[in-house]
Amino acid sequence: MFRRRKRKNSAGNGTHPEPPPLVPNSATPSPFSVDVHRENKTPPVLSDAFKGAIEKAADWSRTGLASEGKIRPMVFFVHADATMKAVSISFKDELHKELLKTRIREKALAENAIAVIILNEMDNEGHKVVLSGVSPGMKASAYVDYGLDNGSKTITSWKITWMNQAVQNIFLDGIFAEAS
């Protein structure tokens, strides 16, 4: 019987070749150089994925509005694979509010959510809702003006408007502070 030898391949055995040492004032550029470009210190522009998640949350609330005739306050947990979980929220008093705030933070960290979005009504008439979202390094808010024909549960108007400043939301404060 013949005995086979294992191939020794630098990529296969987990070792990586060492990069060549960098020589100061060298005329040849290193093959491992990385260009870093920073424009300014203003907050980064919202990523398309983050904006899309907020718009998807608005669409979910629109579906709820069409089926139930009202929009309930909700929390949306966005995951890296573009899936989203929605949870309806309500609280009775300040103690319950604090417990809910803690539970949202714990759930976001336990599920490795990349973004958390809160939807709540902005006025008592129920024709405007605010979506506030937070992700590591990003915050954004949008509001939705809508019209509803209560008799037929038909949405007569739906307009998403992005806000220049993110709305402060106590349920979003500090969610990703411990993770970053």
Image (cartoon, helix red, strand yellow):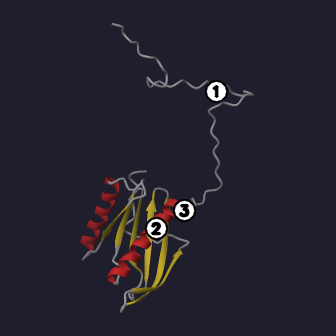
Asked whether 121 or 86 is in front, the reply is 86
Residue 70 % position (x, y): 35, 82
- State the residue position of label 2: 54
Q: Is residue 92 above or below residue 153?
A: above
Q: CA distance from mark 2 to mark 1?
A: 45 Å
In the image: residue 29, left or right of residue 127: right
In the image: residue 144, left or right of residue 2: right
Instruction: Say which residue appears at 44% left-offset and 68% top-offset.
Output: 56
Circles 3 and 2 in contact, beta carbons < 8 Å: no
Specify the quadrant of the image occupied by residue 84. Answer: bottom left
Q: CA distance from mark 1 to mark 3?
A: 37 Å
Residue 80 % position (x, y): 42, 53
Q: Amino acid at mark 1?
A: Leu
Q: CA distance from mark 3 to mark 2?
A: 11 Å
The image's mark for residue 13 is none
Q: Secondary structure at mark 1?
A: loop
Which of disc 2 and disc 3 is earlier in sequence?
Answer: 3
Q: Amino acid at mark 2?
A: Ile
- State the residue position of label 3: 46
Which of disc 1 and disc 2 is earlier in sequence?
Answer: 1
Q: Amino acid at mark 3?
A: Leu
Residue 9 % position (x, y): 48, 20
Instruction: Say which residue appears at 57% left-offset and 60% top-offset.
Output: 43
Residue at the limit of the structure toward the top, as seen here: 1
Label 1 neighbourhood size at 10 Å, few (<14), some (14-19), many (20+)? Answer: few
Residue 17 % position (x, y): 53, 24
- State the residue position of label 1: 22
Q: Secondary structure at mark 2?
A: helix
Label 3 neighbourhood size at 10 Å, few (<14), some (14-19), many (20+)? Answer: few
